[in-house]
């Protein structure tokens, strides 16, 4: 079945929790890290530095601690803990949620783990990933999987916002989300411990964010990515078209939005028509270039690039765009992995190929985490030898399970 970028049924996306959430009532937990309990947390100062090749970079330390609520999601299909985290994101000025799939031994191990961020496609939400079989694809991997809700945002900071909205979706990922994950869970809080991937709209978002912030991720990936989103907007502007406000559909008159489980509802952000940003994505050609993977890849020196993985189905309408991007990487002698196999732009293809994408990124994370452990151990030993640290560091080198847990 070929599924349009804009037409993936929201009801299907909700099926996972409609079917399995009633198995047990979600348990709400309060995790506090000296958080400000105010309803409207302060907007963090956005410290953006200019990195290699003039690419703007940022560090997740720019985030603000806010209170999170964690709900247990009980299913009959997963052997790993599945959680839902709710918090107020300053970059969006709204409550949002993300889903977390934890390693099977997370509650008892005390270990720190690398993190894979997965960005969903247009008209989807974070529940698409369990439907695609992410639990089975990471069953034997020491990995935390983070699945945020990006609405129909394209994961960019919108040029102009209407109706009082704040649509800084890039800031949400690189500041609010990463900060929340590192503060709440036992992660490897470094570039070596982070990978980001996505499908369709999320594939564009993962590559774009990873190329704009190569200091945050060691691996970036796109499946069936809509990689020409910004480039198409540039062509329209260069052709003389005026910047156009985002087209917001009318509320649907059927029951596709009415059966959304309370667990995954977000106030003012649940119905499909609510999930479209009110505003203008790009107002100038320069803005499109800042969010165009075809331009960004030229700006980052090869030695600073994360590992890149791409795939696309042979029957996908976006195949030519993905092949063009792959050809650019080959011409530029940029290392990457690329796959094209039979399949259209839909669930059947993504469910099958997600296993390969996750496997590639996990292999990259494993070798990078080992390097991080060696560096961390060496730095701690230097501190001991210089007298700035009282005791010898734990053994971080032999196995990930020997690494210390960060402060709760």
Image: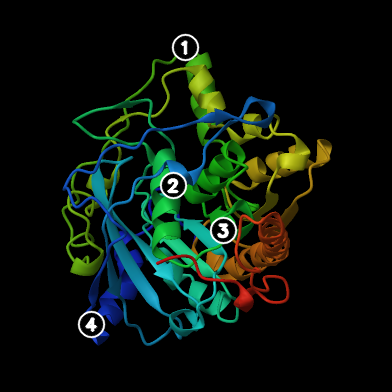
Mark 1–mark 4 distance (CA, rounded to whole Å): 53 Å
Q: Nearer the viewer, mark 1 or mark 4?
A: 4
Q: Nearer the viewer, mark 3 or mark 2?
A: 2
Q: Earlier in the sequence, mark 4 or mark 3?
A: 4
Q: Position of residue 93 (x, y in %)?
A: 25, 41
Give the residue number, with chain letter if any, for mark 2. 173
Q: Earlier in the sequence, mark 2 or mark 4?
A: 4
Q: Earlier in the sequence, mark 3 or mark 2?
A: 2
Tags 4 and 3 in contact by the CB under 8 Å rule? no
Mark 2–mark 1 distance (CA, rounded to whole Å): 32 Å
Q: Earlier in the sequence, mark 1 or mark 3?
A: 1
Quadrant including the C terminus: bottom left
Give the residue number, with chain letter if any, for mark 3. 344
Mark 2–mark 4 distance (CA, rounded to whole Å): 30 Å
Mark 3–mark 2 distance (CA, rounded to whole Å): 28 Å
Q: Earlier in the sequence, mark 1 or mark 4?
A: 4
Q: Residues within 10 Å of mark 4 (few under 14, many from 20)?
A: few
Give the residue number, with chain letter if any, for mark 1. 240
Secondary element under disc 1, as helix, strand or loop, is loop
Q: Residues within 10 Å of mark 3 (few under 14, many from 20)?
A: many
In the image, is residue 5 above or below residue 366? above
Q: Nearer the viewer, mark 2 or mark 1?
A: 2
Give the residue number, with chain letter if any, for mark 4. 22
């Amino acid at each position: 079945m070929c599924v349009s970028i804009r037409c993936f049924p929201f009801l299907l996306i909700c099926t996972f929790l409609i079917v399995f959430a009633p198995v047990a009532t979600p348990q709400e937990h309060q995790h506090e890290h000296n958080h400000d309990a105010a309803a409207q947390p302060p907007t963090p100062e956005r410290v953006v530095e200019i990195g290699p090749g003039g690419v703007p970079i940022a560090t997740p330390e720019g985030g603000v601690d806010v209170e999170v609520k964690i709900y247990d999601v009980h299913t009959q299909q997963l052997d790993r803990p599945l959680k839902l985290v709710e918090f107020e994101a300053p970059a969006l000025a709204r409550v949002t949620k993300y889903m977390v799939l934890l390693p099977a031994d997370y509650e008892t191990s005390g270990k720190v783990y690398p993190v894979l961020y997965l960005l969903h496609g247009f008209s989807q939400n974070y529940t698409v990933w369990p439907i695609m079989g992410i639990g089975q694809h990471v069953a034997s991997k020491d990995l935390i999987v983070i699945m945020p809700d990006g609405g129909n945002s394209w994961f960019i900071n919108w040029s102009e916002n209407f109706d009082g909205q704040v649509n800084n979706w890039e800031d949400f990922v690189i500041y609010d989300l990463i900060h929340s994950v590192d503060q709440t869970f036992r992660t490897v809080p470094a570039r070596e411990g982070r990978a980001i991937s996505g499908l369709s709209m999320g594939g564009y978002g993962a590559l774009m964010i990873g190329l704009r912030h190569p200091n945050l991720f060691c691996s970036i990936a796109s499946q069936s990515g809509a990689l020409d989103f910004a480039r198409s907007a540039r062509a329209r502007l260069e052709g003389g078209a005026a910047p156009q406000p985002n087209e917001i559909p009318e509320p649907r008159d059927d029951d596709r939005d009415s059966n959304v489980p309370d667990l995954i509802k977000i106030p003012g952000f649940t119905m499909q028509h609510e999930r479209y940003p009110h505003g203008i994505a790009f107002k100038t050609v320069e803005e499109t270039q800042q969010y165009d993977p075809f331009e960004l890849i030229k700006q980052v020196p090869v030695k600073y690039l994360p590992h890149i993985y791409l795939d696309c189905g042979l029957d996908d309408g976006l195949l030519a765009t993905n092949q063009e991007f792959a050809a650019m990487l080959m011409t530029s002698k940029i290392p990457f992995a690329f796959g094209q196999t039979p399949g259209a732009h839909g669930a059947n293809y993504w469910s099958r190929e997600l296993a390969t994408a996750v496997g590639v990124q996990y292999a990259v994370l494993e070798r990078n985490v080992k390097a991080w452990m060696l560096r961390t151990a060496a730095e701690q030993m230097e501190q001991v030898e210089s007298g700035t640290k009282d005791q010898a560091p734990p053994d971080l080198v032999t196995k990930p399970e020997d690494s210390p847990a960060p402060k709760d």
